[in-house]
Image (cartoon, coloured by chain):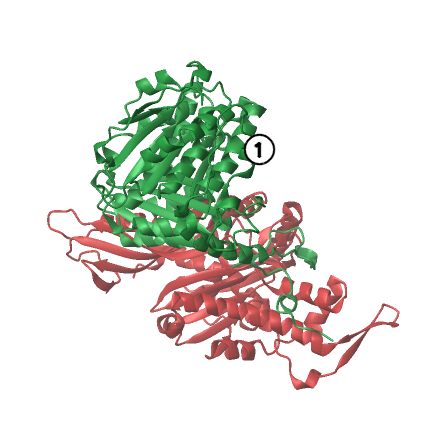
Amino acid sequence: MFDDSNLIVGLEIGTSKVCAAVGEQGADGALNIIGLGQSRSRGVRKGEVVDPAQAEEDVRNAIVEAEQMADVEIRSVYLGVTGGHVRGFNNRGVHPVVSADREISEDDVQDVVKNAKAINLPTENNVVHAIRQHFFVDGQDGVTNPVGMLGSRLEVDVHVVHGNTNRLQNAIRLVKGLQLEVDDIVFNGLASSLALLTAEQKELGALVIDIGGGTTDYVVYADGVIKHTGVLAVGGDHVSNDLAYGLKVPLSRAEKLKLEHGAALVDDAVKDQTLTLTNELGLPIKTINLEHLRQIMSLRFEEIFQLIAQDLEQAGLFDYLRAGVFLCGGGARVPQMASLAERMFQMPVILGRTNSISGLKSALDQPEFITAIGLAKFGSFKTRRREGKSPLTRGLKGVFGKLLQRP
Amino acid sequence: MPAKTMKTKLQDPAAAPGALPPPAARIFGVGNAGVGLLDAISGAEFSGASFVAVNTDGPSLAACSAAVKIHLETRLLRGLGTGGDPERGRALAEEQFATLQDACEGAGLVFIIAGLGGGAGSGICPVLARAAKEAGALVLAFVTLPFWCEGNRRQSQARHSLEQLKAAADGVICLPNQKAFKLIDENTGVLDTFHLTGGFLVEGLRGLWRLLTRPGLIQVHFDDVRALLCGRHAESAFACVEAAGPARSRETVEKLLKHPLLDDGRALAESDTVLVSLLGGKDLTMAEVNRVMEQIGRQCGRAQIVMGAAVDPGMKNRLSVTVMAATQAVAGNPAVAPESNPPAPVMGPETPVPSRRRRAPGLPADQPLVSGSRGPLAAPHAAGRGRRDKAKMLQAQLPLAIVSKGRFDKSEPTIHKGEDLDIPTFIRRGVLLN
């Protein structure tokens, strides 16, 4: 039987589906995915819970399915969060080293990270992650672990991800209502990048774009650390909505058309092609133009990539992305998505594969599950370096950064 | 001619024409309110300016510390002041027009401080402004309008006087007391309230004064202000805010944009000239100045901005920003608008028309109001109106086509740089599907 303490569960309450991934941590620390559960999500819009009762039922279904598949009992989860309110930015903290011998101690490191986190957030916001990037000792750049070094002034760059406390709490409360513990909350984009990227790719620099149902999350790695995160509250739902509006069909029909005939590019094959929609009796009710369908979709995806590209350009990160762009989420399934992204970013685009996980390989190799798997992976990182159980409040403040960055 | 006693004591040693440094300024306090305020401001801060108190009320003048006091009185008033009737004040002032003009002689810049609504302030101010103008000075009036609770009569008197003042002075900075209400604590006493609103007025004057006189990072010359305001007959809104600490530049801008006297920043957007005066300690940085100016500049799209930044060692760690937004006051005064095109003799339309009609009978008829000194002002005036016309053509856009957002109708909109991303992309980009 499985020992509970080795069980790590990632739960993503997405806009289009709820997904739970059950991982088992082996003795060597490697994560093995042993179960997956999913359920259609009905109580979430743009990545945030809008109908708790409905969402609760969906979460229960997904958890039950995962429990059955893995044959375990789930007690606690790592919960993924996203939404338009989640923001990321870089901040620097400074701390003078005051000990007589000028040797930097573990306490100094804790203090400088604390200073870096003490930022001017709106009162209603809370820090989700504060991820260490680099230390500076007396202005000397690129120090990864300053403990034991000599210096008088210690600085650290952190990447802070923060969001509206109440909205974050909504999802947490929902999960707690199901008698599940929340080990920690994790930004979805970060989880996806953990599941997708190898250490080498992080070092080279990579952009991970997770195109979900309600939001598009993106994360930039460069020199092995997270440099930038962002959320656009635009996703597959918007595509369906655009189609429903542009083609004048009901939303459910638009959803179906998107899946059956959608693509990210307008190619010559669909020029002047039409499609006759029929009702349940097989009688024709409406004719739509496939080219229009493609055009509407293509414009929307193009815009999403454009907005991300603009954001990265502003942050000056384009030159760091030597490993290319990684796509995941349901949006990565759209045909020709990679070509569109290639055209927009002018760099190699890779459809995401969960490279860094062992387990049910073929079943897991779906772009939709990457976030849930990444959440489990986050948990495995954390438990591997466990320092005793931390309550949620501390988890909220981003124990992650401290743990992940330690060699 | 009715007998009159004229107590004019022109004892200002600096008043000799030509003896003053360039912005030879004279600050007039008119009426009870104005004379009271004059006491509040006189002092070291306004060095280089001379003070003149003008009133019809003897006791108030006697209590005043101003160097020059002009007591307007006739036997008709029997020492009782104007009794709240602006016509009496006006008649008196007209009668002693020459005296007032003498008092303005040699000044480049005349500030008039008064509370409108009563007899003396409302009646004398427009005449004094005209006198100063004819003496060749640039005239700026700082006036308050009464509270609503002071009654209709005072309101309409004040409004009327304000119109005349606008026509006569180069710039009127007007503080409706009612607006200042929002700035005042509930528990403030009546006396304190008047004191406070007067304080705002003084604050505006002080800001302008600093702009002109303090050695600055960025100096504004008297000529700049003169060129901006000269002959514009503008009405101005102003606000003065102060903040301290490291985030002071951001704070001041935030306060400014929320300031009730600027109508929550709307006054800036509607104005066509904006004067910004920054005053900070020695630690005032150019970056801060830049930040403030950038924000203000964004608010007032088409306005011409004049800014000055000054340093006062006493302001350590603090930043004070005074903003004056002037709006061309041509609209609503049809007498001025159509006729000032011929450049030379434009005196007729600039004379406040209603004033003549309402002059009280029995008192001496006014002299013809023509004088050569105002000729050159016609040109900038005309230019100013040209700008105004352009501004009028700006038209707000109405959202005519309302696009349904389908399933996102009720959710929080996704606004990215002002664009609603919930609306289909092809509609926002105007792609036609046919």
Observer able to see residue B274: no
Judging from the image, what secondary structure is the residue with disc 1 in? Answer: helix
| Chain B tint as drawn | green
Tell me what residue is drawn at x 47 percent, y 28 percent.
B90
Give me the chain that's red. A
Q: In the rendered image, which quarter is residue A237 located in? A: bottom right
Tell me what residue is drawn at x 76 percent, y 63 percent.
A250
Q: In the rendered image, which quarter is residue B423 located in? A: bottom right
**Residue A314 location (% of width, % of height):** 41, 66
Tell me what residue is drawn at x 23 percent, y 49 percent.
A95
Q: Is residue B183 left or right of residue A329?
A: left
Of residues B152 and B100, the one nearer the viewer is: B100
Q: Crowdedness of circle 1 by 10 Å Cα count: few (<14), some, many (20+)?
A: few
Of residues A359 and B418, the one nearer the viewer is: B418
**Residue A58 location (% of width, % of height):** 65, 53
Residue lying at the far front in this picture: please name it.
Answer: B1
Residue lying at the far bottom in this picture: please name it.
Answer: A268
Tell me what residue is drawn at x 47 percent, y 74 percent.
A325
- From the viewer's perspective, is residue A16 above or below residue B337? below
Residue lying at the far left in this picture: please name it.
Answer: A101
Observer able to see residue B423: yes
Q: How many marks?
A: 1
Of residues A99 and A64, the one nearer the viewer is: A99
- From the viewer's perspective, is residue A281 above or below residue B397? below
Q: Give the residue number, with chain letter if any, for mark 1.
A: B357
Q: Is residue A153 left or right of residue B241?
A: left
**Residue B309 location (% of width, % of height):** 29, 49
| Residue type, numbered disc 1 | Arg
Task: Tell me which chain the residue with mark 1 is part of.
Answer: B
Of residues B418 and A73, the one nearer the viewer is: B418
